[in-house]
Structure formats: structure tokens, C-alpha cells
Image (cartoon, helix red, strand yellow):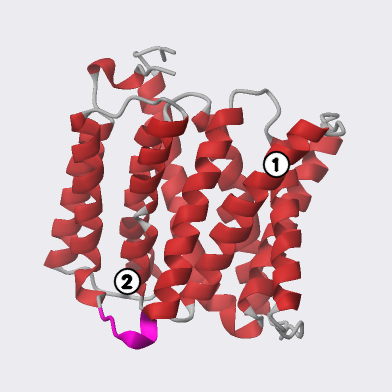
């Protein structure tokens, strides 16, 4: 498949920058609202609110149709991997790890997804692309280095975040396989609702309290996490997957921690030091290798 070289790369790059920015909003919003609800319940509420909005929009637009058994099976697998495991691991790990460790572990996702895409989707994985992924990940490690503190108490949190990265990578491969359809809102809404149901059942299974301490802070965090940072993000991500290979798009997620730093500096007055700046520069080099001119937008399927 070939994407028109004149304007498509700019559009795709701009879309992926927005996806990375929206994804960067997630961690501070999880931390902001995490004290008001148990983690799996909070994750389920996020998925239900985002999925419900997308399904409602599909109904209003006249795009509702009952999914067939095959569609339902695919959406269930996506809901399990991308939403239930991805969201659940992120919420559970957020309360057990420092930001630095969580950032590094979460960003193994593009590396896992690249290998899965090469194997399952037959996407091209060149030496340049692999170098870009490795360099981009190295930039994340450098950026997070000042906050890297690990001891035995973090082991469980690390497993949660790595599990979330694996689930998200599998979910991304499944999303890529079914991308290209005109229908976006409905399938994305349904997989969020299915994944939210799985998170709710998991919350009950582990004995979480369903008491929520409703405050304006929690309500605002839940709304921002569910609508722009989830509903808008997944719709944009799904539409971009139909236009470019997963491996190249995923490289832009290395920008997520850089945007997280920028948000922290703007909202919380945190300082960005020279080490973080070096890490960002290294990430940009990696992304440039993944998303450069010439034949970069052509791939084999």
C-alpha cells in the first residue's frame, strides 16, 4: 500500500503527535483521581464513559449495526488486550512505581508491537526502523533516568506495567488487522465497553471497594481521562492505523514522556533539566529514522 507522499506524511505525523499528547495526559490524570476510587474500578469507569460516548455518537450518526459473531469475537479480543489488560495494568502500576520506572517499562510497547507486526502482519522491519526503535527507547531511558529508583517493593508494579505494555501491543496488532473500515466510532466504542466490563468483573473478583469519593477533582480527572485522553485518542489512533504501518506510527509514542514532562513543567512547575533535554533529543533522532522521507510510507502486507 502506498500513501501519497506530498501531504500524507505531514498529516500522519501531526495526528501521531496529538495521539502522544493525549496519551501523556493519562498518567497525571490517573494520579489526580486515583485516591478517590480503586484502580480497576477507576479504569472500568474510564472505559465505560469513553465507550458509551462513542457508541452514542455512532447511533446519532445512524452508523449503528449489530456486530456479527466474527466482529464481536475480534472486538472482544481487542477489548481484552488493549482496554482490559492495557488500562488495568496502567492503573495498578501507577500506584506502585515511580514515574521514571513506569515510563521506561511502558515504552517497551513499541518494541514488542514491532516484532508482533513483523511476525503477524508481515510488516517490513528494516535495520533503519529497528535502529530508530532502539534509539527512541534509549532516549526514554535517558529522559527518565533522574527518576529511576527501583527496589524489591516495585517488582509487582513493574509486572503490572509490563503486562499493560504487552496487552497494548497485542491490542494494537489486532486493531491494525481490522483497520481500514469506514466504521470507527462503533467498533472503538464497543471494544471499550467490552474491556470496561472485564475490568469491572476483575474489580469485583479481587474484592475492590466500589465506594467512590466523589469530588470535583475526581469528576474532572475522570471526564478528561475518558473523553479527550481515551475516546478522542482511540478514534484518531484507529483512523491513523488505516493509513500507515503500525511500527512507524508506534515510534511516535516515544514522545509521550516528553509531553508528560512538558505538562508537569506547565501545570505543576516541575523543572526540566539537561538530562531530560538530552533524552528528548535522542528520542527525536529515533523517530526521524522511523518516519523519514523517501520510501518510508511504503510497506509490504
At x 16% / y 50%, what residue is drawn?
282
Q: Position of residue 167 (x, y in %)?
A: 52, 54
At x 67% / y 33%, what residue is drawn?
184
Q: Position of residue 254 (x, y in %)?
A: 32, 50
At x 73% / y 86%, what residue is drawn?
209
Of helix, strand and loop, which one carries label 2?
Answer: helix
Count of numbered tags: 2
Q: Is residue 238 above or below residue 243?
A: below
Of helix, strand and loop, which one carries label 1?
Answer: helix
**Along the line of sight, the residue nearer the viewer: 299 or 15:** 299
**Along the line of sight, the residue nearer the viewer: 80 or 61:** 80
- The magenta region covers 149-154
Can residue 290 be seen in the rendering of this structure? yes
Circle 2 is placed at which residue position? 101
Quadrant position of residue 285: top left
Q: Which mark is residue 75?
A: 1
Amino acid at each position: 500500500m502506498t500513501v501519497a507522499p506530498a501531504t500524507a506524511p505531514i498529516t500522519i505525523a501531526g495526528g501521531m503527535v496529538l495521539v502522544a499528547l493525549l496519551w501523556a495526559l493519562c498518567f497525571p490524570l490517573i494520579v489526580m483521581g486515583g485516591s478517590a476510587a480503586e484502580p480497576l474500578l477507576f479504569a472500568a469507569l474510564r472505559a465505560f464513559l469513553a465507550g458509551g460516548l462513542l457508541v452514542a455518537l455512532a447511533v446519532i450518526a445512524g452508523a449503528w449495526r449489530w456486530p456479527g459473531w466474527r466482529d464481536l469475537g475480534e472486538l472482544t479480543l481487542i477489548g481484552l488486550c488493549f482496554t482490559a489488560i492495557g488500562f488495568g495494568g496502567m492503573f495498578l502500576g501507577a500506584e506502585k512505581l515511580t514515574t521514571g520506572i513506569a515510563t521506561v517499562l511502558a515504552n517497551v510497547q513499541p518494541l514488542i508491537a514491532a516484532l508482533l507486526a513483523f511476525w503477524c502482519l508481515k510488516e517490513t522491519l528494516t535495520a533503519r526502523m529497528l535502529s530508530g526503535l532502539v534509539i527512541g527507547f534509549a532516549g526514554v531511558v535517558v529522559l527518565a533516568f533522574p527518576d529511576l529508583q527501583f527496589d524489591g517493593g516495585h517488582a509487582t508494579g513493574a509486572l503490572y506495567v509490563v503486562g499493560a505494555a504487552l496487552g497494548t501491543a497485542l491490542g494494537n496488532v489486532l486493531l491494525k488487522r481490522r483497520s481500514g473500515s469506514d466504521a470507527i466510532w462503533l467498533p472503538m466504542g464497543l471494544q471499550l465497553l467490552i474491556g470496561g466490563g472485564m475490568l469491572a468483573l476483575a474489580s469485583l473478583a479481587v474484592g475492590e471497594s466500589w465506594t467512590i469519593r466523589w469530588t470535583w477533582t475526581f469528576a474532572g480527572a475522570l471526564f478528561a481521562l475518558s473523553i479527550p485522553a481515551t475516546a478522542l485518542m482511540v478514534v484518531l489512533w484507529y483512523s491513523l492505523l488505516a493509513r500507515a504501518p503500525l511500527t512507524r506510527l508506534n515510534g511516535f509514542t516515544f514522545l509521550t514522556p516528553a509531553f508528560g514532562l512538558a505538562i508537569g513543567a506547565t501545570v505543576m512547575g516541575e523543572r526540566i533539566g539537561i538530562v531530560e533535554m538530552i533524552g528528548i533529543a535522542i528520542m527525536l533522532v529515533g523517530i526521524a529514522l522511523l518516519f523519514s522521507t523517501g520510501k518510508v510510507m511504503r510497506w509490504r502486507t
